[in-house]
Image (tube, rainbow, N blue to C red):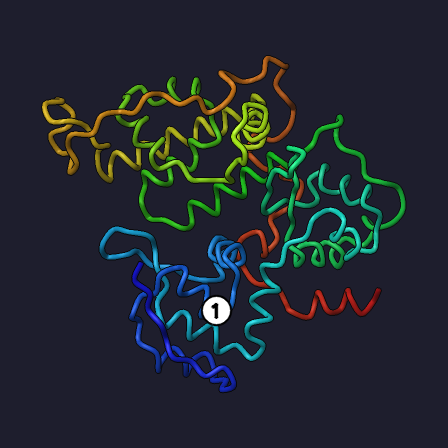
Amino acid sequence: MTVFTTVTTKSAVAPTAVARAAAPAGPRLTLGAAARELELRRGEFELAVQLGHIRTVPDPGGGQRRVTAREVARLRAAADFPESLRERVRTVGTGEGAGLLGIAPGRFTKLARTGRLTPVRCYLNRYRAVVWLYLADELVELALREPELLSGRHPEPDGGQDWRARNWRGRRIAMLARQTDDQWEQAAAVASALDSAHLAEIVRDPYERACLRRLQPETFRIHPESAIAQAMVDRVLLADEADEVEWYRLRLVEALADARDQCPAPRPIGDPAGERSALVGVEPPAPRPLGRTGPRTAAPSARPAGPERTRREPTPQEGGAPVQRSLLRRLRRGK
């Protein structure tokens, strides 16, 4: 892998406007090289990109997206680099998050289950249980915005519902869509929330389904591979309630229309619909089950039609915007 290295002076801090004017747009750094220049671990860097804190650009050769030297210079010019950037992508689990807010872990879990907190990441632990991670900034924002939630009577989930997976799915797909201009990649992100039965019903063309499977975004790997672990992942990845499934079905229909307008899906030579395709000789891979074969048969929920709980407007952090750095410090000093 080719690595580009930029020369920086860590002790010298220049205003952001000066850095932008002085630094050319190129060269374009690989994501690994940019992470090293920004002194971020791989997971921190990926999350910063997903949240919009680090801007990426397409690779002219069609490979993985890259980061310009100008963007690296802009971030390094911050007065409190790299601490401020790391703070913006700091994630905490239930225990650490509860400690940050000064509440019991049980109360923290109930806040998350009722949709007051939206996970930004998740993974399977060694016991094959789903571990949810939250942005520390958003916990501070909640404490400052709704302090009454941190004391008094515990909030109770509506009808025992758990909103964590549903809210995470909506947030994940929104972040994926912001990272690409390719309409087929955006459609694949939406399709990742639907199981194989729904996908086959909406996408009748096998070559289009093959294209969506090929572009399906990676979530988290399973080590070791097992049917039990895959079932747990499917429960997190796939929409399974009637209103949420219908919402993603409609989104996929719209995304497919945009993708077809952009370019047709690859198909082999000789296919009548493949005359305009830029790629030839592509055979659809064997179908790979994405999870359950259909939605649950329970009665439709009375919850809103969107993928996320719509109890409140999204916070600036959930949209990828930075928050004031003083918020976290104010809460810590108050403990």
User: Quadrant of residue 287 in the image?
Assistant: top left
Residue at image point 36% right, 31% down:
213
Query: Percent from the top left, x then y, of residue 163?
Result: 66, 35
Q: Which image quadrant: the C terminus?
A: bottom right
Query: Percent from the top left, x then y, of residue 122?
Result: 60, 42
Pick the front one: 244 or 73: 73
Q: Find disc 1 in the rendering and name its residue.
A: 38
Pick the front one: 200 or 310: 200
User: Which amino acid type corresponds to the residue marked 1 in the rendered image?
Assistant: Leu
User: Quadrant of residue 188 in the image?
Assistant: top left
Disc 1 element: loop
Query: Around disc 1, counting alpha carbons within 10 Å, would you say few (fewer than 14), some (14 to 19), or many (20 or more)?
Result: some
Farthest residue, direction bottom: 12
Q: Is residue 202 left or right of residue 148?
A: left
Q: Is residue 132 left or right of residue 57?
A: right
Farthest residue, direction front: 224
Q: Which image quadrant: the N terminus?
A: bottom left
Query: Percent from the top left, x then y, of residue 109?
Result: 76, 41
Tell me if residue 19 comes above or below residue 183 in the rendering. below
